[in-house]
Image (tube, rainbow, N blue to C red):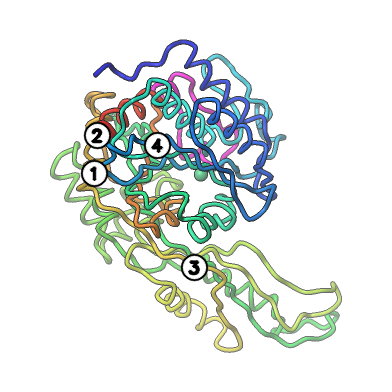
Amino acid sequence: MPAFTLQPAEREEALSLLRDLIRIDTSNPPGQEAPAIALLEGHCREAGLETQVVGAHPERPNLVARFAADPEKRTGRPLVLSCHVDCVPADPTTWIHPPWSAHDDGECIWGRGTIDMKGFAAMAFAVIAKLKREQWPLTRDLLLVACSDEEAGTRLGSQWLVDERPDLLGSPEYVINEVGGFTVHREGRRFYPVQVAEKGVAWLRLEVGGKQGHSSVPSRENAVSRLARAIDAIDRARLPWHASDEARRFLGGFARPRGSFAEKVASLLCHPLIGPCLLPLLVRDPSRRNSVEAILRNTATPTCLINGTSINVIPGRAGVDIDGRLAPGQTTTDLVRELETVIRPVLKRDYSISVLHESPPVSFPTDTPLYREIEETLVAADPGSHVVPAIIPGFTDSRNWARLGATCYGFYPLQLPPELDFAALFHGDNERIPIAGFHWGIEVLGGMLQRFLGK
Ligand SMILES: [Zn+2]
């Protein structure tokens, strides 16, 4: 079987689609993904794929494009390449090159969405289009699904597709999605995390009561002050450790190449009493420490305040929305119970916690033919590197695809140089994608699919 090698024209086509996607501002909110979906749909139709554009809102549509297997050769359920075309907003004043310019400095394409995740949209298109043009014999349908509204919670995107039009996806067996397959450099070694689990979501609202009155006379019963004390308590609280199997495999995977002592230390890090004391000694960098902590416990982050109506009135009620995330095996009730132990000593009475939105943690098995193919592909593409099954503290569209019974992996292959910190680029300023690493990713993804779909 010939390797999946891009011709110069194919390299340029993929890059030019990426640049065009970046130049369409799909900041969510408000989203307005329609032009980006239309652009992708046009490319897919031109490549000979069957396409459908559907959604709850004309300005927030979703694309389902299909390369159908010959019915006589079809032996498996579909495989979906999943992406979203919306991005988080960007503040141009803090960027070196404007976030919607798709500036090319010869090494990287700059722009909001290059990493998260228009790069994968262009990559997935390049792969499916090449397989279609070359009429690769498939044993299952290959789909490219591009969604709106992932960044604000998936409601009009993958959630809508799963609830309203699951027929379009036809019960996929596998989904390949974002957050995995990129190079992580640690102490001279190269790792490739492949996402196999994500934490759950519990978006909560804490409301506290107080005594309304004239604000010329201060009062300890001010609802705003009471709320502030509760928020401070949440901020200082360290919720209990919940080291799941997913977290153990993730931390163990990074420790294994460094020998059995490092593996022992990683397993101690998962211990509910030793772990919280050991972590600050092991991980000095605060942002890395926060990332490790976030996979070992439930978290609760206050985000939006809901307060008062007038500067000269002490309000009778005040509230805050809290972005709660659940470790594998945990429920919203568990997190609310943990929060109660933090809030009750401070507020004592007259407060309530309500649930705005929830979705459970998801995790997927690694003993599958697709995971093995991904693992073998990455090690062959970057000899000496290590593949690690990963859990992420955030969510992706996979939490909805899981409801279709699909096994979902985060595998958006990108070869990154040591100086480029993936975590800092994700939703960060100066997001950019290395051109060589992007082309490498297309060939890695294409080669992997060529082998897997031919079997
Ligand atoms: Zn994303």
Amino acid type of the residue tagged 3 in the rendering: Glu
Instruction: Find the distance from the CA under tag 3 to the CA under tag 4.
Output: 35 Å
Q: Is residue 8 left or right of residue 39?
A: left
Q: Earlier in the sequence, mark 2 or mark 1?
A: 1
For the residue pair 124 and 275, the one nearer the viewer reads as 124
Residue bearing mark 4? 68
Instruction: Find the distance from the CA under tag 4 to the CA under tag 1.
Output: 37 Å
What number of labels is visible? 4
Instruction: Find the distance from the CA under tag 4 to the CA under tag 2.
Output: 34 Å
Is 62 above or below relative to 100? below
Q: Earlier in the sequence, mark 3 or mark 4?
A: 4
Residue bearing mark 1? 253
Whether ligand 1 has any atom under 8 Å from the Cβ at mark 4 is answered as no
x 55%, y 79%: residue: 353
Instruction: Find the distance from the CA under tag 3 to the CA under tag 2.
Output: 34 Å
Work out which residue is located at the far top of the displayed protein and give it: 8
Q: Is residue 432 magenta?
A: yes
For the residue pair 320 and 414, the one nearer the viewer reads as 414
**Which disc number belongs to residue 131?**
none
Magenta residues, start to end: 417-440
CB contact under 8 Å: marks 3 and 1: no
Residue bearing mark 3? 358
Instruction: Find the distance from the CA under tag 2 to the CA under tag 1.
Output: 8 Å
CB contact under 8 Å: marks 2 and 1: yes
Residue bearing mark 2? 386
Give the percent coordinates (x, y) of residue 230.
57, 74
Q: Is residue 107 left or right of residue 200?
A: right
Amino acid type of the residue tagged 1 in the rendering: Gly
